[in-house]
Amino acid sequence: MDNKETEFSRIIREQKATIYTVCYMFSKDKEEVDDLFQEVLVRLWQGYDSFQGKSDLRTWIYKVSLNTCISIDRKKKRRKAQPLLEGVDLFDKNDADNRQTDLLHERIGRLQAFDRAIVLLWLEDMSYEEIAQIVGISVKNVSVRLYRIKEQLKQM
C-alpha cells in the first residue's frame, strides 16, 4: 500500500463513526446503510486528491457524506423502491429511552433530506457556522431553518 492509501485508510478509521451516523440518518436497514457507507467511501476516495484543506477534514467528510446520501435518497425516491426488509428494529422497544429515540428518528426521517442533514449536524453539536459551511447556506439561514424544523417536529 502506498502512502496515499495508508493515509486515506487512517482517516477513514478515524471518521468511520461520522460517516455511519450520516448514512444511518438516511436508512435504518443495515444492508442499505452499508451500501451508503461504501458509496461514501468511493466518493471520498475519488475526491481525496482534490481536497485542498481549505476546510477542516471532518467538515469535508460530512459534506461528501451528506451530499452522497442526499443524492442517493433522491434517486431512490424517484424509483419509489421499497426496502426488502421493512420494520427492521435496531433498538429494544421495551426501553423508554429507546422508544423516545425511535420516535425522534421516525420524525426526523419524515423531514426533507436537506432538513434531515441540518438536524443531523446540529445533533452532532456542530456550530451554526460549521453547518452553514457544510450545507452551503448562510449562518442566518441555518438559524431560521433549525427554528422551522424544530417547530415542524413539534407538530408531528
Image (spheres, grey):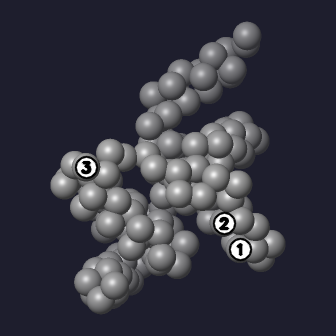
Q: Quadrant of the C terminus?
A: bottom left
Residue lying farthest to the top in this orientation: 1
Q: Residue 94, labelled with which disc?
A: 3
Image depth: mark 3 or mark 1 in front: 3
Label 1: few (<14), some (14–19) or many (≥20) C-alpha neighbours in 10 Å: few
From mark 2 to mark 1, how far is it between C-alphas? 6 Å
Q: Residue 77, labelled with which disc?
A: 1
Identified by mark 1, the residue type is Lys
Residue lying farthest to the right in this orientation: 79
Identified by mark 3, the residue type is Asn
x, y percent for residue 138: 41, 78
Identified by mark 2, the residue type is Asp
Q: Secondary structure at mark 3?
A: loop
Position above or below: 11 against 69? above
x, y percent for residue 149: 35, 82
Q: Secondary structure at mark 2?
A: helix
Residue beneath label 2, please?
73
Q: Quadrant of residue 106?
A: bottom left
Mark 3 touching mark 1, by CB under 8 A?
no
Q: Is 154 in front, or is 54?
A: 154
Q: Residue at x 25, y 49 (%)?
A: 94
